[in-house]
Amino acid sequence: MKAIKASDLTKMFLQGEETIYAVKDVFLSIEQGEFVSITGTSGCGKSTLLHMLAGLLSPTKGKVEIDGEDIGRFNERESAKLRCEKIGFIFQQFNLIPVMTARENIVISSLFKEAKLDERWFAELVERLSIADRLSHFPSELSGGQMQRVAIARALINRPKILFADEPTGNLDSANADAILDILSELHAENNLTVVLVTHDPEIAEKAGRILVMDNGEIK
Amino acid sequence: MHIYVRRYFERNKTQALRLLAVFSMFVFCLTLISVFLDSSARGETERALERYGSAAVTVLNLTEEQAELFAGIAGADMRYASGTLYISVEGGKNDAMRVLREVKKIRDAYAPNLMIGDFTDPIYSPKSSSPGNALPFKIFFILIQLFPLSLTVRMALKSQEDDIALMRSVGISPSKINRLLTAELMSVYIVSLIIGIAAGNLFVGLVAKYFFNFAAGDFTFSRMVYRFSFSSTLRTALGTTAVFFAALQLAIYRISRREDIFSKSYYSLNPPKPGSEQRLLNIAPQKLISEVYIKRDVRIDRAAAVAAVPVIAVSFLFIFYCGADAAAAVDSFVLRGHLTYKDAYLTKADIEDFEALPCVDSVDWSCRNNNFQIKAPYGAINAAGYGDNYYVSLKTFSNNEIEELKSRESETGNIFSEGSIYAEGKFSEHFPVGETVELYSSDGKKIKDVIVAGYCGKDKKASSIMFYCTRENYELIAGEPPLPTDIKITAKKGTTDSELDELRGLIAEKCAGKDISVTDTRRQYLDSLKLNRALTWIFFALCFCLIFTSAVIIIQLQRLKFELRREQYSTYRLLGGTGDVIFDSMLRENLSRAGAALFAGAFFGLLPVVAMNLIYGVPVSLFSVSFFALTLAVLLLAYLIPLIPENKKPL
């Protein structure tokens, strides 16, 4: 079954009178449980593509389907439901809420879902991510690696089908980066999780089952 | 530098306009107080001049022969009219004080019964503008205004934090940055200075012209005369600029010299209470979000909350003052007269003429207190603090006092009887009950021997000796007809102003050429309405400035807060939060903060009002209450307005 399907996906910007294509005519389908990395040089459009696939950015042309549903037709409530139930995000900047503790940062995701928190899954995640003893700490009191682990826990707490990761190791040292990638690989394998990872680093990209290389907004 | 300043205004037109509004209000407020107090002092001076001429000292109730006694005082100009000697002094306050001392010396030596009016106080000086009175007001308002001003500047700088950090990172020194920021904000301030001073002068000029244009004379109790004063304007401009510059430097200093130039950390994070994890499982997301911001993102909103407190407190105090004063003005029709010259006293026949008028309800009158006197021993006089006087005037009980004493006869044990003397305090030691004393009239003629009949009771604190004499029996005891000096004429309820004019005409006729001061409570009431209207306009302008400034600050602070949290709100939406949930969390947070600020403001504003009400029984007008409610509503709105576009912004 196809987790994500993109057809004729294009994003263009106007700069003065010049039209710039950030993403151009991309056709893409990703199976459920697949680990795909999108790589390429800086400015090639990989982050723009990821954002369109995740519904964070509306395409100029084309459509994105998740689980067979065209997310471009979703209203705000449906988009929110999609993000709650089916999608998880991890970013290079972690995007944790600075006034919330690690625990609150993770739990807030499940509160949006309006479902009871799966406490066993929560315990397993924080144990696995080695942040069980840091749950009462604020992001400013955590290291970069710990912050990214909290972000992963937050992304996975609602057991999403798809995880979008935008340069998740960009701000980490190599040891921490390896650890995070190992965790992502394990969670992907164990939970049939679809992972779409954007990175400019070819070594990291190679950890994925399929590598998509972008150049000037197009997939090669 | 000028390129930077010009670019700043090109890029930040809206912010520059906001700053212009807040700075102008600051200057306007201080100008208003300054010009108002100057104009008020000028009006008072004019009134004092009309009333007393340039007299520094007056001697009352004296004959022309007695006036001659004071003729030799150096540096004093004498004018005698209607039993009063007006003494003007050439020179300053020291000369006036010297003349006053010499007048007292002559009085004590030759005519100890004469009364002296002392106008050597600077308020009666024609050139006085009483700057001392204005200073506490100005300091008070400067302190109140400093807070929003410093907040506004800090806020403006906050939005330029990135620019400042970048300038620092490329090697521009803190002092250079300080100069740039000072230049850009001072250039806005200079425009504000012109606007604020012009508006303040214009406003007070209009108020003085249209609301303080009262009838001159004894009935007037307040006046305001506006005249543009270059020196006063210059002083205000320099004062406000100095305060502004100081506030500016305080705000700029910190931001231009920050150690950690890229740090944006403004959170004051309080860790969650132990055991609160379980609560997280059942809480609504919007509640959690609003709670964490209320508890942990405190600094910027605490400032906004505090901004509301003085505004509400001060504005309510002002409107309370205006409203209560107007409400306290009783709709009465009483004319009180006090005659200060013996030859001009009214007669009983005059009183009967007043009583005959159809609009008059009652006429109450009393004689002079010192129509009777006794020779008192030195010890008694000294003990009572009467100086070296040989004669001591007896107080005659007023009719009200007599009624009160009579009603308390059983309680005090004294039976008060007509034509008897009663001693109290130290006098009772020298005039024991049963002793005979000689009673003299005020001109030293012996009337009769009188026996001390008792004590007036311990409730009268002043040590004195009193003569019990009702006005009905005055002539019988004193051997001469009573001469009413103080009269109180009460008109009937519903008396019209034209009917009162008849009474006023009769008073003018009876007292023609006499040195009489009349208090017309009806006219006072009408004047007080005009005064209150004028004051209300002044205070309304001040309140408006404060509320406007505060509202702008609150709105700006809220916008800045949401701007700083832009990424966080996007994150919530990424995690599945809808715009409605986020809006709900913002609404909860701002309602909670507004509630705390407005409650605190109302508390501090109401505290003195309640105290005044309990102590003095001063009522609160409906106008002040409704204005207070409006103030709260405006400030509440200031907290809510910034929410409107926030949940609609794209991710």
Image (cartoon, coloured by chain):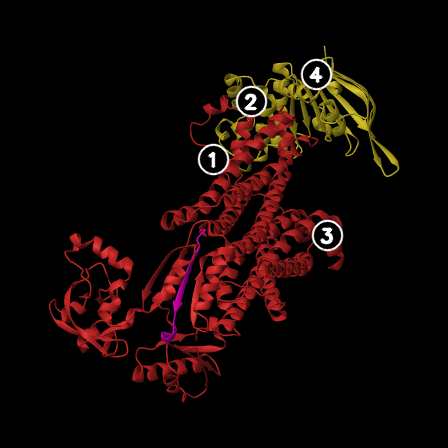
In this view of the protein, which residue sits in the foreground, B40 or B608? B40
**Disc 4 chain ID:** A
Residues under labels 1 and 2: Cα distance?
A: 20 Å
Instruction: Determine if the magenta segment contains residue A56.
Output: no
Magenta range is B331-344
Could you tell me the amino acid type at mark 3? Tyr
**Chain A, colour shown:** yellow
Q: Which chain is red?
A: B
Q: Earlier in the sequence, mark 2 or mark 4?
A: 4
Q: Which mark is residue A34?
A: 4
Residue A215: quarter of image: top right
Up-down relation of residue B152 to residue B96 (above or below): above
Locate residue B336, reporting x and y percent: 40, 62
Q: Is residue B241 visible?
A: yes
Q: Identify the secondary structure beneath mark 2.
A: helix
Residues under labels 1 and 4: Cα distance?
A: 40 Å
Up-down relation of residue B547 to residue A9 (above or below): below
Residue A174: quarter of image: top right
Locate residue A62, reporting x and y percent: 81, 21
Q: Which mark is residue A111?
A: 2
Q: Quadrant of the C terminus of chain A?
A: top right
Could you tell me the amino acid type at mark 2? Leu
Could you tell me the amino acid type at mark 1? Pro
Nearest to the eye among marks 2 and 4: give it. 2
Do the residues under discs 3 and 2 have CB atoms within 8 angstroms?
Answer: no
The residue pinned by badge 3 equals B8
Q: Is residue A115 left or right of residue B604?
A: right
Do the residues under discs 1 and 3 have CB atoms within 8 angstroms?
Answer: no
**Disc 2 chain ID:** A
**Mark 2: few/some/many CA within 10 Å (<14, 14-19, 20+):** many
Q: Which mark is residue B271?
A: 1
Instruction: Determine if the magenta segment contains residue B334.
Output: yes
